[in-house]
Image (cartoon, rainbow, N blue to C red):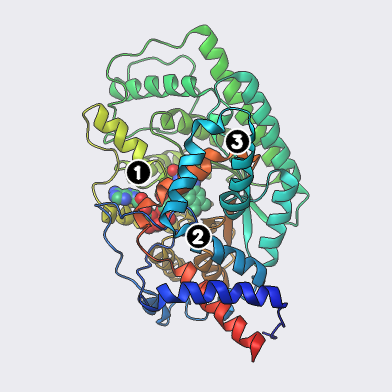
Amino acid sequence: MATKVLPPKQLQNIRFFVSRSLKTSSSSSSVSTASTAVSPLCLAEKPEPSFQKPPTTIQDHAKPSILDFHDHQKLFSNLPTTKLLHASANLYFGSIGPVVDFGMWVMNSRLMETDNIVRDAMLKTVRRTFFEHFCAGEDVVEAGRCIKKANEAGLRGMLVFAVEYTGHNDACDQNLKGFLDTVHSAMSLPPSSVSSVVVKVTAICPLSLLERASDLLRWQQRDPSFNLPWKHNSFPILSDSSPLYHTLKKPEPLTLQEELDLQLGQERLWKLCEKSVQANIPLTVDAENTTVQPAIDYLTYSAAIKYNKDDNPIVYGTIQTYLKDAKERLLLVCKAAEKMRVPMGFKLVRGAYMLSENKLASSLGYDSPIHNSIQDTHACFNDCASFMLEKIANSSDAVILATHNVESGRLAATKALDLGIGKGNEKLEFAQLYGMSDALSFGLSKAGFQVSKYMPYGPVDKVIHYLLRRAEENRGLLSASSIDGELMRKELKRRLKAAIF
Ligand SMILES: Cc1cc2nc3c(=O)[nH]c(=O)nc-3n(C[C@H](O)[C@H](O)[C@H](O)COP(=O)(O)OP(=O)(O)OC[C@H]3O[C@@H](n4cnc5c(N)ncnc54)[C@H](O)[C@@H]3O)c2cc1C
């Protein structure tokens, strides 16, 4: 790569971050990095008791492998120095405990609920820091620009209008408009730069209704003779091992109004599916809390039956592999879809609602629905990934492996090649969140796979829930240094030297 002469101000900035951060990184050259979920919000907390340090190190990754993390110059060759500097600075500040805690306190505080100068100042600060690092912009135009940049660097984008948790039909209609605009603008971006558009069902169907429908679906799982007159054709939603503690007594049937509202929610999803079919861009439905997930899966699967045609899975569901019943449910859905000749797409994730899931189960006196150990979660993710890779090798199904875990990425990449799933195969996508695990994204991309960044956009005050989850979900990793931060610092140091000498 040709050496670029850097302007003095940039050089000064690089010197500052490289010299500060190398003080910490030199003492920990074998940083624990099986997981690379790096966030400026998340690097300074105590590890969760159940989280055991992953065994792999950057040195491990330096061994000959499908994923090459050794060559940071090659890895970040598409990232301009300013971007690298910005990301590295964010990671650095995110490693300062009080900064993270203060940021979370601000975003959670009542100050954010009322209109005042303090709130404006807070929003401005959040925008310049957490928001810029984790979000693709405040509107679809900014997000489009961000996707184009990612695309120039060899990556694709999952375009996410980041609204969620809605209480009323009016707000749902408004959100639907936002999602439709997202698909519309995706159509005008460079071909295949958008791998999918993402929707959260809680943004287009009232939350309390999704809870009610989930209760009823769970009761039907308990008692198959329980009639749900509103239920359309769907795949299995729960399995024999699914926890049903959320619904301890027989729920009242939906009122006429609730049935009408559910129908409206379903029709909103259908409109979005129709637009996605028209654009030929997959629609990925995010997974959320188990309180509402049965209804989300029900709506997703019935939409998949309606719109996934001709070997083209347009509607993708999401399976959270931190749940004990994940594999069983995945197998049931795949079997039913195969029987009905419906091509299915799945996004596999570990899951981002661990704290609230544990809290709810424990408050009701039940075991957590989440695997008892992180190793069980890793095993479940890898197992489901392996199952889906075998499926896509022999069918028109598709999978998005959404993970920051290097070991999972490496295992899946190796298995894909063993199965003859060619690099660049449309049915296999790796994905990481925007602002996290760039090293893994570029590593997989350089190895020839299709890789997307999950790119949320929206007004700052609307994406606060998303930003808080990024902070919350990474708490277990906070003591571990990140492969991203370390590699970025090495690359910045190299560029600094190259610019000086
Ligand atoms: C593209 C993309 C889309 C996503 N979409 C969704 C979505 O729709 N719904 C959703 O819920 N999440 C979603 N996520 C978030 C994802 O679930 C988190 O990033 C995930 O929690 C981190 O897992 P990881 O695969 O990156 O692996 P790692 O970084 O290895 O994850 C480890 C984390 O798993 C957690 N964990 C899981 N199980 C256990 C356990 N049994 N004991 C202790 N800790 C445990 C810990 O907090 C730990 O920090 C998405 C992520 C990506 C990249």
Instruction: Give SS at disc 3.
Output: helix
Please, what is the three-letter code of the amino acid marked with disc 1?
Ala
Q: CA distance from mark 3 to mark 1?
A: 40 Å
- Label 2 Cα neighbours within 10 Å, binned few <14 / some 14-19 / many ≥20: some
SS class, disc 1: helix
Residue at x 35%, y 69% (from the top left corner): 32
| Residue 399: image location, x then y, percent | 50, 53
Farthest-out residue, bottom: 501
Residue 22 placement, left or right of 179: left
Up/down of 247 relative to 473, above or below: above
Cβ at disc 2 under 8 Å from ligand 1: no
- The residue beneath circle 1 is 326
Circle 2: residue type: Phe
> Looking at the picture, how far across and down is residue 306, in whole percent?
58, 33
Looking at the rendered structure, the secondary structure element under dot 2 is helix
In the figure, is residue 284 to the left or right of 213?
right
Mark 3 or 1, closer to the camera: 3
Q: Which residue is mark 3?
A: 119
The residue depicted at 66 percent of the width and 39 percent of the height is 459
